[in-house]
Image (cartoon, rainbow, N blue to C red):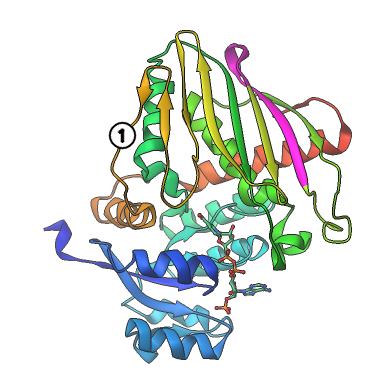
Amino acid sequence: IIAAKKLGIALVGLGGYAGGQLAPALQETEHCYLAGIVTGTPQKAADWKTKYNIPDKNIYNYENFDQIIDNKDIDIVYVVLPNAMHCEYVIRAAKAGKHVICEKPMAITVEECDRMIAACKDAGKMLSIGYRLHFEPYNQEMMRLGTKKIFGEIKTIEAHDGMGDTNGWRLDKKLAGGGPLMDVGIYCVQGCRYTTGLEPIAVTAVEGPKTKPEKFKDVEESLDWTLEFPGGIKAHCKTSYTKNMNLLQANAEKGWFKLSPAYPYRGQQGETSEGKMNFPSVNQQARQMDDFALAILEGRATPVPGEMGRQDVKILQAIYKAMETKKRVEI
Ligand code: NDP
């Protein structure tokens, strides 16, 4: 009975991620579909209308977006804009009576996250963050091995996520909120949290040297940080916009378990001290969106709620404070 209704999703911001990953994933989803778009670029509206068969009445721009309140086809608004725009559009979506998915990082300050959570709560709508890896089997195995203590207590974690290059708004602190930490380092924070099932209590951090100072005027080029967790667990993390890295490894009392690469859209590889992991390849984004649609239809909580996004933003802010003050910062 539940599966009979597919919820309509409207994507807001038709950039690389919406066009390259989310729209294709929405062709595979069972409980939701691509019903509408919100874009500031008229040519994209025309192209998407044809490509995905989207009716004119479901196409909005940033000015008339609030009229989506009257559109019965749209159940969920998915905000895929630059980081600093998430807050405004999540709140406008909630006020228009829609459930919301917001891309990571949830926002650029904790205060914004609080306002986003409150807006969705006031509207009686659900809010989730685009944490696709919670629906990916290799990362789910890291969660199982760590939280069920299959190799005993975790002692240390190594989490590295870096890209060889980037451009555009990601280099602009006003729109991005910071550098690679906000964009990809966040996956290391997530990986440490879901592998241990614990919350970090303190952090130290060191900014890397700027090898391209003209490019990284506004944001860090790279950053190393160490999170302390309860029980003395130390997580050593690294992020960069000039070096490709992709690792999540836990070293425990009786063995180790790791993914490398850990965070891509597909192609995860996993291994433990006892041998190779072997899981099916899935469409992470399709699973993530289907799970949110089902959570709405079933009236249950999402495993990746706004509160999880807020906690990550809180940790990211503590990492930046540790970087700037060169002191250990309690979280
Ligand atoms: P892009 O730059 O490719 O796209 C952003 C889109 O936002 C633009 O194409 C544009 O769409 C719209 N936009 C509106 N105002 C601005 C502005 N001032 N500057 C730039 N763009 C603007 O970014 P991504 O798609 O890579 O990232 C979008 C969000 O998704 C980010 O928060 C990012 O962190 C997240 N993301 C998440 C991933 C994941 O794996 N979960 C992967 C990649 C990104 P239009 O022309 O339609 O108005």
Q: From where the camera sits, is residue 303 visible?
A: no
Is residue 70 part of the magenta span, yes or no?
A: no
Q: What x and y, as percent, mark residue 40?
A: 58, 83
**Residue at x-position 36% and y-position 44%:** 135
Q: Is residue 290 left or right of residue 15?
A: left
**Which portion, as a residue range, is magenta?**
222-234
**Residue at x-position 39% and y-position 70%:** 23
**Quadrant housing residue 36:** bottom left
Q: What x and y, as percent, mark residue 285?
A: 39, 56
- Quadrant for ligand 1 reads bottom right
**Residue at x-position 34% and y-position 54%:** 283
* Labels in figure, total: 1
Q: Is residue 67 left or right of residue 27?
A: right
Q: What x and y, as percent, mark residue 208?
A: 82, 40
Q: From where the camera sits, is residue 173 visible?
A: yes
Most distant residue in the front direction: 275
What's the amino acid at mark 1? Answer: Asn
Q: Quadrant of the N terminus?
A: bottom left
Q: Nearer the viewer, residue 269 or 8?
A: 269
